[in-house]
Image: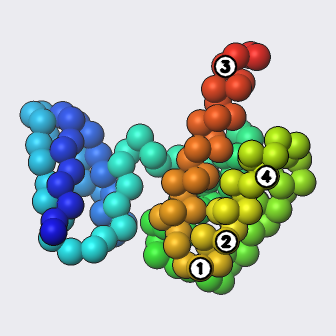
């Protein structure tokens, strides 16, 4: 079953490392095979990394986009997650950090990225309330 992506005008998506940008009108892509896909709104650039949650997300995102499941990128992920765990006091966040680590160890990088995205969003929402 193909994956159907509906793109807004000008919206970009990364598919297996290639950036694809939609034209001036709404468009649809059908992906017939498995691929590493990330929408523009879920891409973080190095200059956007401001918090430990961001650093963890960025490192997991790099693993996902490259398809690497070991080596230096894996080590960077584990290091970022260890730093985050050390600073996190919320039990819910600590449980999710452990879940991310387990997913990475099992090679389920996209699942880890989704859980990591929740941490970043929750941190951003908390900062907006207190900021």
Name the residue carrying label 4: 94
Which of the 4 image quadrants contains residue 85?
Answer: bottom right
Crowding near the residue tagged with mark 3, few <14, some 14–19, many ≥20 C-alpha atoms within 10 Å: few
Task: Return the x and y of residue 127 as percentages of the image width and height.
Answer: 71, 24
* Front-most of residues 105 and 64: 105
Evaluate if marks 3 and 4 touch, with contact meaning CB atoms under 8 Å apart.
no
- Residue at screen point 20% across, 61% down: 3
Evaluate if marks 2 and 1 touch, with contact meaning CB atoms under 8 Å apart.
yes
Q: Secondary structure at mark 4?
A: helix
Precedes in sequence: disc 4 or disc 2: 4
C-alpha distance separating marks 1 and 4 = 19 Å
Is 81 placed left or right of 14 in the picture? Answer: right
Evaluate if marks 1 and 4 touch, with contact meaning CB atoms under 8 Å apart.
no
Q: Secondary structure at mark 2?
A: helix
Q: Is residue 127 above or below residue 52?
A: above
- Residue at screen point 74% across, 45% down: 92
Crowding near the residue tagged with mark 1, few <14, some 14–19, many ≥20 C-alpha atoms within 10 Å: few
C-alpha distance separating marks 3 and 1 = 34 Å
The C terminus appears in which quarter of the rendering? top right
Is 98 placed left or right of 37 in the picture? Answer: right
Q: Is residue 123 visible?
A: yes
């Amino acid at each position: 079953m193909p994956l159907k992506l509906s793109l807004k005008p000008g919206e970009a998506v990364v598919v297996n490392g290639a950036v694809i940008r939609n034209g001036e009108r709404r468009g649809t892509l059908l992906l017939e095979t498995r691929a590493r896909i990330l929408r523009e709104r879920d891409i973080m650039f190095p200059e956007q990394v401001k918090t430990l949650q961001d650093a963890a997300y960025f490192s997991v995102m790099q693993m996902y986009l490259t398809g690497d499941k070991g080596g230096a990128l894996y080590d960077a992920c584990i290091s970022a997650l260890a730093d985050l765990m050390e600073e996190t006091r919320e039990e819910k966040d600590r449980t999710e950090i452990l879940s991310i680590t387990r997913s990475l160890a099992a090679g389920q990088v996209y699942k880890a990225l989704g859980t990591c995205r929740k941490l970043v969003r929750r941190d951003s929402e908390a900062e907006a309330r207190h900021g």
